[in-house]
Image: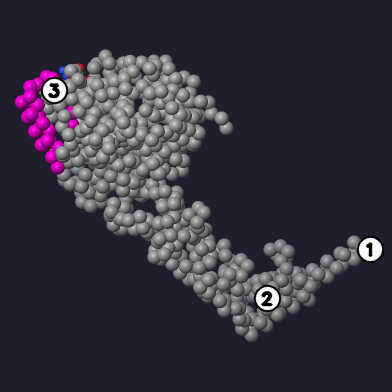
């Protein structure tokens, strides 16, 4: 199938994302700096690094991005008019072997939620502190957010250095050092800069390069996931979404799943770093042209991902950390929940105790108001319901958690395994908690392991006799304990059947399966039955399951009655008697007689024509012969 070419044109820049017709030409002032590349149609060997700004309002973040890249990241009319950043802005810079994608965030406290959508995918933080104002509330809040989101590295810029003297700058440097002491930014470069007169910009670029070199590359072998921050139409192409790819990779022409809308869509084309590319990978700012959907059907917070690998969720189990400076958080409190580019309201359920103290952490459950796609280890931020301030954050342990239940006493131990365990320990615990077994899809959605990793882990657990693979295509894993339990139930049920039905040779396979209830999947039943048959504990003959040696033995009285029934029907020939009449002549009670009748039917001595009508087989044979003669005559 051929797809229309998807190229960067003079009227479409998917990465800066200005909707047509207001879209600026690519080779404009905004792009005329160092980042105006000719379009190439291949993915680049450059290392992609996302740098996010952080800092108080008006501290010079956007101006600094322009000084670094030549692109002013504010793109909305309102931003230009008010001189403040409202929503996320983007710019690019290619330096040596690194391609920087800058995400510029607003400093205004009212727009922290937009900042959060931008901060979730960053590798490096560019913490901006204005020399004339020093550390202010959003300097702290943005810094805490970066810490809680697990950002590992960054650079501190003391902006507007042209406005203060050397002594003030010296003091501010000490203050900044103190501020980040003991955190991920301890020891990070602290550089005075002035976007106005251009001092310190080269040093800042060098520091960013150094930090970028020290970053380990993201794993592009995982399943693809990109939290969407914008969706807009581009004339001639249709819907384009943008975001930072946080895992895996995707190529033009492949399918992605839009979640939580559960729609599989074709990728018509891709942009990254201001140019058309064949493929985008984890760590790249990306614009994805999607076919078959209106841009209005997609909102910030949705994701595009490898089809079938992720699931949207309303319940998650987490490790939640509370900031030291905030009030105690109570069980059942409502909070604003932010992860990836999504935000919703969450109700907090605490597993241990009635509250979390400031500065402490706890295992918790969130019931989310809206469905969100989350993966294990994803970081999140929580903000107080009202007034809205950042109070904590943490990591997702189980993205597909069940509703908390008092009887679920193993949950805390399970969460501890999810938090610290090896793959084998995690899969063993997951299987043990799911008596129905766990499917490949479920394991992937819960862990983000690759299919090959899931299979290898399951095989290892088979060797240590912790799980059983009851089906391999599609994979279904059962804990050995659950499997042994099913086997035991099978044996007990067959035993009971023989006791209750001494005159029947065995239980029908389907009745045996139905008797185990819905909590045993067909694959598990089949494998368990095979296992007990192999151990010679049961025998399967045609559709009947029985214990070995469970032959039917009739008492002399029953033998006599059986013979009597057969004779009664034989004698009557085609004038078949009713069952009631035949039973009335017997010396045994009706229930036993009924079983003898069943045996005769199974042995095909008698043949049932309708519920009421039974003939002796010999009578029917005679009838068939007669009819044959009649036809010949
Ligand atoms: N003197 C001087 N002024 C600067 C410098 N950098 C920025 N400014 C000015 O500071 C003001 C705010 O700059 P922005 O870059 O918009 O600040 P911001 O941090 O992006 O603000 P928000 O995005 O709204 O949080 C503007 O008027 C800039 O011209 C500098 O190095 N020196
Ligand atoms: Mg700004």
Q: Upstream in the sequence, badge 2 or badge 3? A: 3
Give the answer, above or below, for where 187 lies relative to 354.
Answer: above
Please identify the quarter of the rendering in which residue 433 is found.
Answer: bottom left
Foreground mark, 2 or 3, reads 3
Name the residue at 90% across, 64% down: 630
The percent position of residue 632, horizontal first and vertical second, equals 92, 63
336 relative to 327 in the view: left or right: right
Mark 2 vs mark 3, CA separation in Å? 112 Å
Q: Upstream in the sequence, badge 3 or badge 1? A: 3
The stretch drawn in magenta includes residue 173: yes
Mark 1 vs mark 2, CA separation in Å? 42 Å
Mark 3 vs mark 1, CA separation in Å? 120 Å
Residue at the disc numbered 2:
584
The percent position of residue 569, horizontal first and vertical second, equals 75, 74
Determine whether label 1 and label 2 are within 8 Å by CB. no
Please provide the residue range marked out in magenta: 156-182
Name the residue at 34% across, 23% down: 35
Towards the viewer: 358 or 577: 358
Q: Is mark 3 within 8 Å of ligand 1?
A: yes
* Element assignment for label 2: helix
Residue at the disc numbered 1:
633
């Amino acid at each position: 199938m051929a797809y229309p070419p998807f190229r960067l044109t003079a009227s479409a820049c998917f990465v800066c994302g200005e909707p047509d017709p207001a879209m600026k030409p690519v080779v404009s002032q905004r792009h005329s700096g160092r980042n105006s590349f000719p379009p190439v149609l291949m993915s680049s060997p450059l290392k992609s690094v996302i740098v996010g700004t952080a800092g108080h309002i008006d501290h010079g973040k956007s101006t600094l991005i322009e000084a670094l890249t030549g692109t002013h990241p504010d793109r909305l009319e309102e931003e230009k008019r008010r001189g403040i950043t409202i929503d996320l802005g983007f710019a690019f810079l290619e330096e040596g072997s690194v391609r920087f994608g800058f995400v510029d965030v607003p400093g205004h406290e009212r727009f922290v939620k937009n900042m959060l959508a931008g901060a979730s995918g960053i590798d490096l933080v560019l913490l901006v502190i204005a020399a004339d104002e020093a550390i202010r509330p959003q300097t702290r809040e943005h810094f805490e957010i970066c810490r809680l989101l697990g950002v590992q590295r960054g650079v501190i810029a003391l902006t507007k250095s042209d406005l203060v003297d050397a002594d003030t700058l010296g003091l501010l440097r000490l203050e900044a050092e103190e501020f980040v002491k003991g955190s991920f930014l301890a020891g990070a470069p602290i550089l005075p800069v002035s976007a106005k007169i251009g001092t310190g910009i080269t040093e800042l670029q060098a520091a960013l390069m150094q930090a970028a070199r020290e970053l380990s590359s993201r794993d592009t072998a995982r399943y693809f996931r990109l939290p969407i921050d914008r969706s807009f139409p581009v004339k001639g192409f249709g819907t384009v979404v943008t975001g930072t790819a946080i895992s895996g990779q995707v190529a033009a022409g492949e399918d992605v799943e839009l979640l939580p809308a559960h729609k599989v869509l074709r990728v018509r084309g891709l942009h990254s770093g201001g140019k058309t590319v064949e493929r985008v990978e984890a760590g790249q700012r990306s614009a994805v042209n999607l076919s078959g959907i209106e841009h209005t059907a997609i909102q910030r917070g949705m994701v595009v991902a490898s089809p079938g690998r992720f699931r949207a969720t309303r319940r998650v189990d987490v490790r939640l950390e509370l900031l030291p400076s905030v009030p105690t958080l109570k069980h059942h409190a409502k909070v604003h929940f932010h992860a990836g580019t999504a935000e919703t309201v969450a109700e907090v359920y605490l597993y241990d105790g009635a509250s979390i103290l400031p500065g402490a952490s706890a295992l918790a459950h969130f019931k989310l108001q809206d469905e969100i796609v989350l993966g294990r280890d994803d970081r999140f931020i929580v903000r107080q319901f009202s007034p809205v301030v950042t109070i904590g954050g943490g990591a997702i342990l189980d993205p597909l958690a069940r509703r908390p239940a008092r009887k679920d006493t193993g949950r805390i131990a399970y969460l501890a395994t999810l938090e610290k365990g090896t793959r084998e320990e995690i899969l063993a615990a997951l299987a043990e908690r799911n008596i129905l077994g766990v499917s490949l899809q479920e394991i992937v959605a819960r862990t983000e392991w690759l299919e090959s990793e899931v299979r290898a882990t399951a095989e290892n657990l088979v060797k240590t006799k912790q799980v059983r693979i009851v089906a391999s295509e599609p994979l279904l894993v059962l804990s050995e304990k659950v499997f042994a339990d099913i086997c035991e139930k099978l044996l007990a049920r067959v035993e009971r059947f023989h006791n209750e039905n001494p005159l029947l040779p065995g239980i029908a396979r389907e009745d045996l399966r139905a008797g185990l209830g819905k909590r045993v999947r067909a694959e598990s039943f089949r494998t368990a039955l095979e296992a007990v048959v192999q151990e010679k504990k049961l025998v399967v003959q045609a559709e009947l399951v029985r214990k070995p040696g469970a032959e039917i033995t009739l008492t002399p009285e029953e033998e006599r009655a059986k013979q009597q029934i057969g004779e009664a029907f034989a004698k009557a020939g085609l004038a078949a008697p009713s069952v009631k009449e035949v039973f009335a002549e017997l010396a045994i009670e009706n229930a036993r007689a009924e079983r003898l009748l069943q045996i005769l039917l199974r042995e095909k001595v008698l043949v049932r024509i309708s519920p009421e009508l039974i003939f002796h087989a010999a009578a029917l044979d005679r009838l068939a012969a007669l009819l044959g003669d009649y036809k010949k005559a």
